[in-house]
C-alpha cells in the first residue's frame, strides 16, 4: 500500500524542453515539446555573472551557442563568466540547425512565464557553475518562489549537488526537492532524506525492485532520466516508478502512454 502523498506531476517529462528535436534548453524547445503533447519539462538552470538565472546544460557556452564566433575565441567560454546582457545576445539555435538560427538563450524567467501561462509543470535542474552551488541553489529557489507564488503546483527543484539543494531548502523550504543520482553512492537515501527531498531522480538503469522499494518505503517518489527506448520505459512503469524524463518526445506521446 502506498502511503505517500499524492504526486501532482505528469509521468512524462520532456528532457531539456524537447530532447534533441530542437536546441536544448531554449523556449523553442519548450514549444516543440508542448506541440508533441508534453505538459512537463526538465531544464538546466545556472547563474549569469550578474546573478540572472538562465538555461544552459554545460559549464561552457561552446557546444550550444555561437559564443566563439560572437565573442571571440579568446574570451571566456564559461557561461557564468558573462553578464546576462551579453548572454542574451548569443545565438543558441544555429548549432542545432538552420531552422533555429537566432534562437536566444532562455532566461529562467521567460521559461517560467511560458510554463505558468500554459499550465505546464517544470522540473528545474539546478546546474551550478562549479563553485557556485550554494549561490545558485538559493537564487533559483528564490526566483522560483516569486514566479510560482500564485500557482497551485510548484516546480520540482532537482540537483546532483547536495549543497545546491541545501541552499534551496534554506531559501525556500516549501519548494519540493529531488536528489539527482548518476550512481548509487553510499548514503544516497540518507542524503535525500536529510535534505527533505520528495523524490530521487536517477539514471534509469539504477532502478530495480530493491532500489524502488527502498525509496518508496522512505516516502520518496522515483523518477528516471533519460528514457529513450520503449522497453526501458515499460520496465520502469512495471517497477511502479513515477516519472520518466525523455529525449524522445517524437516517440512517446504522453496522452497515449500509461
Ligand atoms: O535532470 C535529469 C537529467 O537532465 C540529468 O542529466 O546531464 O541531462 O542534465 P543531464
Ligand atoms: Mg538536466
Image: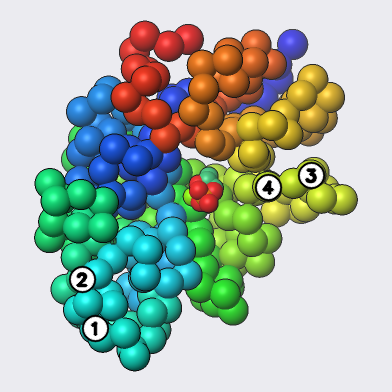
Q: Residues within 10 Å of mark 2 (few under 14, many from 20)?
A: many
Q: In this rendering, which labeled residue sits more in front, label 2 or label 1? A: 1
Cβ of mark 4 under 8 Å from ligand 1: the answer is yes
Q: In this rendering, which labeled residue sits more in front, label 1 or label 3? A: 1
Would you say the residues marked 2 and 1 are in contact, meaning their CB atoms lie under 8 Å apart? yes
- Judging depth in this view, the residue of 98 and 61 nearest the camera is 98
Give the residue number, with chain letter if any, for mark 3.
184
Q: Residues within 10 Å of mark 4 (few under 14, many from 20)?
A: few
Residue that lies at the very extreme toward the bottom in this rendered image: 74
Give the residue number, with chain letter if any, for mark 4.
182
Q: What percent of the width, then of the height, locates residue 57?
A: 44, 59
Query: Which of pointers 4 and 1 lies earlier in the amino acid sequence?
Result: 1
Would you say the residues marked 2 and 3 are in contact, meaning their CB atoms lie under 8 Å apart? no
Task: Judge from the rendering whether residue 27 lies leftward or rightward of residue 192; answer left or right.
Answer: left
Q: What percent of the width, then of the height, locates residue 239?
A: 69, 16
Q: Is residue 198 shown above or below 168?
A: above
Query: Which of pointers 2 and 1 lies earlier in the amino acid sequence?
Result: 1
**Which labelled disc corresponds to residue 90?**
2
Residue 234 in view in this figure:
yes
Whole-number angstrom distance, CA of label 2 to CA of label 3: 37 Å
Whole-number angstrom distance, CA of label 3 to CA of label 4: 7 Å
Q: Secondary structure at mark 1?
A: helix
Q: What percent of the width, then of the height, locates residue 6?
A: 55, 23
Give the residue number, with chain letter if any, for mark 1.
71
Amino acid at each position: 500500500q502506498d502511503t505517500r502523498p499524492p504526486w501532482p506531476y505528469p509521468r512524462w517529462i520532456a528532457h531539456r524542453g524537447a530532447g534533441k528535436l530542437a536546441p536544448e534548453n531554449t523556449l523553442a524547445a519548450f514549444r516543440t515539446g508542448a506541440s508533441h503533447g508534453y505538459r512537463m519539462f526538465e531544464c538546466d538552470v545556472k547563474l549569469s555573472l550578474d546573478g540572472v538565472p538562465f538555461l544552459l546544460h554545460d559549464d561552457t557556452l561552446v557546444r550550444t551557442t555561437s559564443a566563439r564566433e560572437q565573442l571571440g575565441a579568446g574570451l571566456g567560454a564559461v557561461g557564468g563568466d558573462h553578464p546576462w546582457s551579453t548572454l542574451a545576445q548569443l545565438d543558441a539555435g544555429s548549432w542545432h540547425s538552420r531552422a533555429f538560427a537566432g534562437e536566444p538563450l532562455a532566461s529562467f524567467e521567460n521559461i517560467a512565464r511560458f510554463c505558468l501561462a500554459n499550465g505546464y509543470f517544470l522540473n528545474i535542474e539546478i546546474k551550478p557553475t562549479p563553485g557556485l552551488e550554494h549561490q545558485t541553489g538559493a537564487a533559483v529557489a528564490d526566483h522560483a518562489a516569486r514566479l510560482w507564488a500564485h500557482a497551485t503546483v510548484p516546480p520540482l527543484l532537482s540537483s546532483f549537488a547536495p549543497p545546491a539543494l541545501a541552499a534551496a531548502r534554506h531559501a525556500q523550504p516549501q519548494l519540493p526537492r529531488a536528489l539527482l543520482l548518476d550512481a548509487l553512492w553510499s548514503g544516497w537515501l540518507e542524503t535525500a532524506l536529510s535534505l527533505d527531498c520528495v523524490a530521487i531522480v536517477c539514471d534509469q538503469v539504477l532502478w530495480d525492485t530493491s532500489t524502488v522499494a527502498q525509496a518508496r518505503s522512505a516516502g520518496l517518489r522515483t523518477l528516471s532520466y533519460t528514457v529513450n527506448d520503449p522497453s526501458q520505459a515499460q520496465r520502469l512503469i512495471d517497477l511502479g516508478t513515477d516519472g520518466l524524463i525523455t529525449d524522445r518526445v517524437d516517440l512517446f506521446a504522453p496522452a497515449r502512454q500509461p
